[in-house]
Image (tube, grey):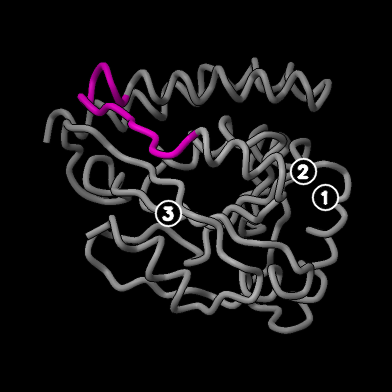
Amino acid sequence: MFRTILVNLLFFLWMILISPLVLVGLLSTRLLRQVARVVVGGVLFIARAVGGIKIEIHNARYAFVAIKSKRPVVASKHMSVLETGVLLIFVPDSFFVIKRELMWLPIYGWAFWRLGMVPVNRKAGATNMAALAERVRRRIASGGTLVIFPEGTRARPGTPVRIRGGILHIARTLEIPILPVGCDTGLYWPKRGRVSPGTANIWFEQILPHDATAEEIANVIGKHSA
């Protein structure tokens, strides 16, 4: 339990201490991308040095080539802050679909806006989906790569994968393939629970077509998370 408290405490302290640098990064998107690498690097250092958590990325070369050549939407299992940070710095010009409340955060909300994150109001229904697809289309046209957590929130290990409609609507409307990403990070640094040392894995899987079903996506991103 002491390890868990210390890791989470250092994480929050790091995010506070680094926030002035984030403010400086707001001067330009390119600069902010570099600052984001520093922020994520600090988080991963805390995870490794204090939590005893190493990160192993599988099929990274395949993913990098696929992202550059096929411009897919990256659909990732979401279990921890770990894969969020890794995807932010690994995926070139990445932008995320995030709940709009995160855009209201001081400093970090401004950074999300500067990085082109797309806020979503989960209560707006079908109207929101149409607007979401159009905002994503514009960001992709300007060179961005979409990263989305198709379950909509962090999941606990062993829970069934429930794919929300956003990923299906975006992929089919824009006719872009899907690059599934699985992970087991929740076993080591979960949303709630004990931080455990070990090697957390992130798997980039084979690309799925734009009309893949929710079941097909769920089977791929969920197969490593039990």
Query: CA separation, marks 3 and 2?
Result: 20 Å
Q: Which residue is mark 1?
A: 139
Q: How many marks?
A: 3
What range is drawn magenta here? Answer: 47-60
Q: Secondary structure at mark 3?
A: loop
Percent of width and height locating residue 10? 34, 23
Which of the 4 quarters of the picture holds residue 207? bottom right
* CA distance separating discs 1 and 3: 22 Å
Q: Which mark is drawn over residue 193?
A: none
Marking on residue 78: 3
Residue at (39% x, 24% y) in the render: 44
Which residue corresponds to the image point at 22% horizontal and 26% vertical from the top-left? 51
What amino acid is at disc 1?
Answer: Arg
Give the residue number, with chain letter if any, for mark 2: 144
Using residue 16 as the reference point, say whether residue 10 is left or right of it: left
SS of the residue at dot 2?
loop
- Amino acid at pointer 2: Gly
Asked if the magenta segment contains residue 54, the reply would be yes
